[in-house]
Amino acid sequence: MSEVTPVRMPKWGLSMQEGAIVEWLKAQGDVIAEGEDLVDIETSKITNVCESPAAGVLRRIVAQTGETLPVGALIGVLGPQALSEADIDAFVADFQANFTPEATEEGAVAGLATTLVPAGDRRLRIARVGPAEGQPVVLIHGYSGDLNNWLFNMEALAADNPVIALDLPGHGGSTKDVGDGSLKVLADSVGAMLDALGVPQAHLVGHSLGAAVAARLAADRPGLGLSLTLIAPAGLSASPISETFLTGLIEAQRPRDLRPILELLLADPTGVTKDMIDDILKFKRLDGVEEALTALRDRMVQGDDAAALRADLRKIPSALVIASRDDRIVGPPDEAALPAGFRVAWIDGAGHMPHLEQAGAVNALLAEQIRSS
């Protein structure tokens, strides 16, 4: 039945294997526009909204609230009102009889193979995906994050370019030594890692603190950055970075204390999952992490690095800034203070994590930025 459109469990990121239905936002029988918000789905990383793949009537809700299904499974059916219930029943039965969940390789829970790379006197954990040849896209996460923060973006970017995601010093599987916690230390480490990999040029993409690191690297090493994209960048707002978030994350030791801190990251606080909380708490228990986060926090709150970076932005010919007006961590960037070559793309329905909250829109912007550079 070509007029029937299945609504499937989406695949958001390399590591997603299944999702749980949180809430249907439309009722059976509602007329739906293509791209309209249809159902909230929880993954191990975040709760997000699944948009309708086509226009039509929501003829059948197959997966009920609370059900967990594999990626690709049938969760709903769109079709014209004229189709009989028997036709819908037949479509659902045929789909279920022929559906096979995608195979998952053993050990591929994180979806990535990682390795440690020398970076001066440090070692950084990296993951590489995509083609072997071409100009790489380098992904630099934010404060308290790691390379897994890019799992909703890596697959889309790797369709056309090699992708290198890394853990900054003090984070993930990298050396926990952050020196004086300055942007220069972090940027020099990323640059040394690229040197060790034999990468003379790359498309630089950073989020939050990682955006400031990417900009520092681009300013200090002209010619390295083929393009520069700054997502929710720290240090480019007229308002100071949230010390409540930075300090709260360091001090929280229990899930109930950490949850309200992490909820500051998202436009919809219900997007914070148990796995997200557990991952942060496990990370904070590693030797050297609290000291590293404290050093980075103190440096960011002091503000000298951000001021120096703003003065050096003129050394960077152009950049794309992806931001939200509802960012409660770093605030929206001050467009009037940015150099002429910087362009701001505003993302609705997101807070400080637009590359997770609105991954499709951000991925499209990233792809266009890379293609046009």
Image (cartoon, rainbow, N blue to C red):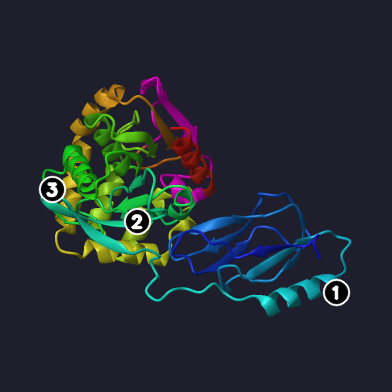
Helix, strand or loop for disc 1: helix
Task: Reply above or below: 4 against 158.
Answer: below
> Which residue in the structure is indicated by mark 1?
86
Amino acid marked by disc 1: Ala
* Residue 235 percent coordinates (x, y): 30, 34
Q: Is residue 146 left or right of residue 371?
A: left
Question: Is residue 326 at least partly visible in the picture?
Answer: yes
Q: Nearer the viewer, mark 1 or mark 3?
A: 3
Instruction: Mark 2: give few (<14), some (14-19) or many (20+) Cα within 10 Å.
Output: many
Q: Residue at x 31, y 26 (%)?
A: 316
The tag earlier along the polypeptide, 2 or 1, is 1
285 or 224, nearer to the observer: 224
Mark 3: few/some/many CA within 10 Å (<14, 14-19, 20+): some
Q: Residue at x 22, y 31 (%)?
A: 220
Give me the residue at 19% from left, 64% from top.
286
**In the image, what residue type sits under mark 3?**
Gly
Q: Where are the magenta residues, as a range? A: 331-359
Classify mark 2: helix, strand or loop. Answer: strand
Q: Are marks 2 and 1 in contact (CB under 8 Å)?
A: no
Report the Cα–Cα distance between label 1 and label 3.
Answer: 67 Å
Mark 2 lies on residue? 128
Question: How many marks overall?
Answer: 3
Tell me where residue 10 sits by quadrant. Answer: bottom right
Percent across and percent down for residue 332 are: 41, 34
**Which residue is denoted by mark 3 in the rendering?**
120
* Side of 278 where 299 appears, left or right: left
Where is residue 262? Give x, y as percent: 37, 54
Q: Mark 3 or mark 1, which is nearer the start of the sequence? A: 1
